[in-house]
Image: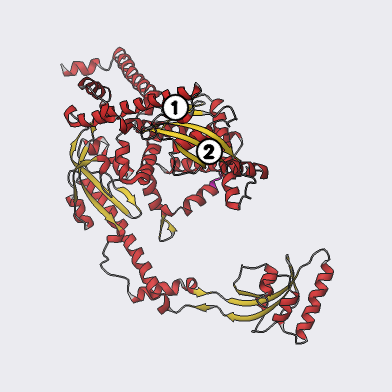
């Protein structure tokens, strides 16, 4: 039977059928690959897609920045889903702006050369060991950032091109003197106001919240009552600073390093000089003649210091007999420097020397010859550098061994820890957002979320958490986020609803008072028993009055004899206020701006103009942002 099948399979018809079947499978496979996208686009800008990977990297960076900014309070802020949604939206908006800038830079013909790119990479401290670029270090770092060399170079080229655009546009902006004066006048303006604050705490006790309202709020705001996901982790930590060297650097090593790098331990030649300067002015020949005459008087025996006091155009040094203190090479005008360093002995005076400032007569008052520091003076510094370098070399050797063993035996960290000479550390079940150092960095957070580490419970790859500081993590337990029971959160819901109702109530009271004033009633009379507070010289930076009241007071139109503007203001703490603007006081003359103020105003204007450019670019671009992608992490 098998023989007959084998013979039949050699026929022409069978071969054609098999060929068609194979071809159909091949085309189906190719179609599947062509029709499948690798990631969900986050946005599209003039046809250029911003992918989920790019968004995730930017989001993690922003999250890390916020964690550093807010510290321990970040976890409370991050628990608010509305706040995190705003963070994600801001990241997408920034990515869209970045892409618009890149497209404009390309349109303007801006580019970064390969040489510039290479120079920037080589000079980045992240890729250096002992102050020198290290290619292995470079590859390790960019791979931990999920880059390949080509993709990292293009990422960096894009970022540098965008920086060129910012410098070209924002760096050429300026502000006129009359704009400075106008801005200062507005800044120094004062306003007189009366205001009344309606305190929500005064009505809080009268507010009633029903069980039905609590239940409805709980049902509609489930996201607010999430118990965070918890995770337990075993990890090994390796850092160069903790490595104990088997053999510390020897005195022979110190001597060899000193001999090899002796040029680093040279005190360069220094000279102390005094000078007499005759400025060229409009008549260079006359200035030179005057300098020659002064030199002749010095050679005739007159005192150099006294002549400097009476003849030198450099009024600062003239007060000190022309003294310029110690100078080294490459500090002064080349012609001046050449003349100063050609003088042989203390007391020598140069001929007349011309520089861009005029004509000089230079006197050598003291000198320190070039001197090599003795080994004893730099021994401790060299020893520390050799020790640090040895630790770094040992660190990378141990890191390689650690990575290999953790990969070979992926269901435990014990073997990897033994190879690296460290112990396995354990972190009990903890909210993922509250993990302590060194687990509270974006690289670790990302690794802990991968299916391999979280679900399969295998060792992670080596994760860099700082310079010469890495960890490998392994999940030992995990509890997903859950919604807290109503009984656990009922008190907080009641407090929230009471506060909201109290705020609404005092706002109604404030609006009732506003209506009375608008109908012609005197402000104080409309306030009734409420205390009317007065500010006669309110400034924009006042701290004694609620910021919301200050902002509203400076937004209100100027009052007239017959109309005093009045407005209700909602305060950030839930209170409400009614504000009446009585007068606007302009400064008689704005104070002259100092350089720092001018620079600050110029930067503010440049920033405003640049943001306006970005808005214009966005308005003229085709931007698509699928709403479903903005919420993904």
Name of the residue lying farthest toward the bottom = 301
Q: Which mark is residue 526?
A: 1
Residue 215 drawn at (x, y percent): 22, 22
Q: Count the labels in the image.
A: 2
Picture quadrant of residue 2: top left
Answer with mark 1 or mark 2, whichever residue precedes in sequence.
Answer: 2
Quarter of the N terminus within the rendering? top left
Residue 235 drawn at (x, y percent): 22, 48
Decide: few, some or many residues near mark 1? Use Cα within 10 Å; few <14, some 14-19, many ≥20: some
Colour mode?
A: secondary structure
Residue 18 drawn at (x, y percent): 30, 17
Left/right placement of residue 444 relative to residue 336 reads left
Decide: few, some or many residues near mark 2? Use Cα within 10 Å; few <14, some 14-19, many ≥20: some
Left/right placement of residue 5 relative to residue 121 reads left
Is residue 504 within the magenta segment? Answer: no
Quarter of the C terminus within the rendering? top left
Q: Residue at x 65, y 68 (%)?
A: 332
Residue 326 drawn at (x, y percent): 59, 74
**Magenta-colored span:** 111-115
Residue identified by numbered label 2: 192
Is there any visible trace of residue 111 in the rendered image? Answer: no
Q: Residue at x 77, y 80 (%)?
A: 295
Q: Which mark is residue 7?
A: none
- Which mark is in front, 1 or 2? 1
Note whether 423 is above or below 583 in the view shown: below
Note whether 430 is above or below 227 in the view shown: below
Q: Secondary structure at mark 1?
A: helix
Q: Secondary structure at mark 2?
A: strand
């Amino acid at each position: 039977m098998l023989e007959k099948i084998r013979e039949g399979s050699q026929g022409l018809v069978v071969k054609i059928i098999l060929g068609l079947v194979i071809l159909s499978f091949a085309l189906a496979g190719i179609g599947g690959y062509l029709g499948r996208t690798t990631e969900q686009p986050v946005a599209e800008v003039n046809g250029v897609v911003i992918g989920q990977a790019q968004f995730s990297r930017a989001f993690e960076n922003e999250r890390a920045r916020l964690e550093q900014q807010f510290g321990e309070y970040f976890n409370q802020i991050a628990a608010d889903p509305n706040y995190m949604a705003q963070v994600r939206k801001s990241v997408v908006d920034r990515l869209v702006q970045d892409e618009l800038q890149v497209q404009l830079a390309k349109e303007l013909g801006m580019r970064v050369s390969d040489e510039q790119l290479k120079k920037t990479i080589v000079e980045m401290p992240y890729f250096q060991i002992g102050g020198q670029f290290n290619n292995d270090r470079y590859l390790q770092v960019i791979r931990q950032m999920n880059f390949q060399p080509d993709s990292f170079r293009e990422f960096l080229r894009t970022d540098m091109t965008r920086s060129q655009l910012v410098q070209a546009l924002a760096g050429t902006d300026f502000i006129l003197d009359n704009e400075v004066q106008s801005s200062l006048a507005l800044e120094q303006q004062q306003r007189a106001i009366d205001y009344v604050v309606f305190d929500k705490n005064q009505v809080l006790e009268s507010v009633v919240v029903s069980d039905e309202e609590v239940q409805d709020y709980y049902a509609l705001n489930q996201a607010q009552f999430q118990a965070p996901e918890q995770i337990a982790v075993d990890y090994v930590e390796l850092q160069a600073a903790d490595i104990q060297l088997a053999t510390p650097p020897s005195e022979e090593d110190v001597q060899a390093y000193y001999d090899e790098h002796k040029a680093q331990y040279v005190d360069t030649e220094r000279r102390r000089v005094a000078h007499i300067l005759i400025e060229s002015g409009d008549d260079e020949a006359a200035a030179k003649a005057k300098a020659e005459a002064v030199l002749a008087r010095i050679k005739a025996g007159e005192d150099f210091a006294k002549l400097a006091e009476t003849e030198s155009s450099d009024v600062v040094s003239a007060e000190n007999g022309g003294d310029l203190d110690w100078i080294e090479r490459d500090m002064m005008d080349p012609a001046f420097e050449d003349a100063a360093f050609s003088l042989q002995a203390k007391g020598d005076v140069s001929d007349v020397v011309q520089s861009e400032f005029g004509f000089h007569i230079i006197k050598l008052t003291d000198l320190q010859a070039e001197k090599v520091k003795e080994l004893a003076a730099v021994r401790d510094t060299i020893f520390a550098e050799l020790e640090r370098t040895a630790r770094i070399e040992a660190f990378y050797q141990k890191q390689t061994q650690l990575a290999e063993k953790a990969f070979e035996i992926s269901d435990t960290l014990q073997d990897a820890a033994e190879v690296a000479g460290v112990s396995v550390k354990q972190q009990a079940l903890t909210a993922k957002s509250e993990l302590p150092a060194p687990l509270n960095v974006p690289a670790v957070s990302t690794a802990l979320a991968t299916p391999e580490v979280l679900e399969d419970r295998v060792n992670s790859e080596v994760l860099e958490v700082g310079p010469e500081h890495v960890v490998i993590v392994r999940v030992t337990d995990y509890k997903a986020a859950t919604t807290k029971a109503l009984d656990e959160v009922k008190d907080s819901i009641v407090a929230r609803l009471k506060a909201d109702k109290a705020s609404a109530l005092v706002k109604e009271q404030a609006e009732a008072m506003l209506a009375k004033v608008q109908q012609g009633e005197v402000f104080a009379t409309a306030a009734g028993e409420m205390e009317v507070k007065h500010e006669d010289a309110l400034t924009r930076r006042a701290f004694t009055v609620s910021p919301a009241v200050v902002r509203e007071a400076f937004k209100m139109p100027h009052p007239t004899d017959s109309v005093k503007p009045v407005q209700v203001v909602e305060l950030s703490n839930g209170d409400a206020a009614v504000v009446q603007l009585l007068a606007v006081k302009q400064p008689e003359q704005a104070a002259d701006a100092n350089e720092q103020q001018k620079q600050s105003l110029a930067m503010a204007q440049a920033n405003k103009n640049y943001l306006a450019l970005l808005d214009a670019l966005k308005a003229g671009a085709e931007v698509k942002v699928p709403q479903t992608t903005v919420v993904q992490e």
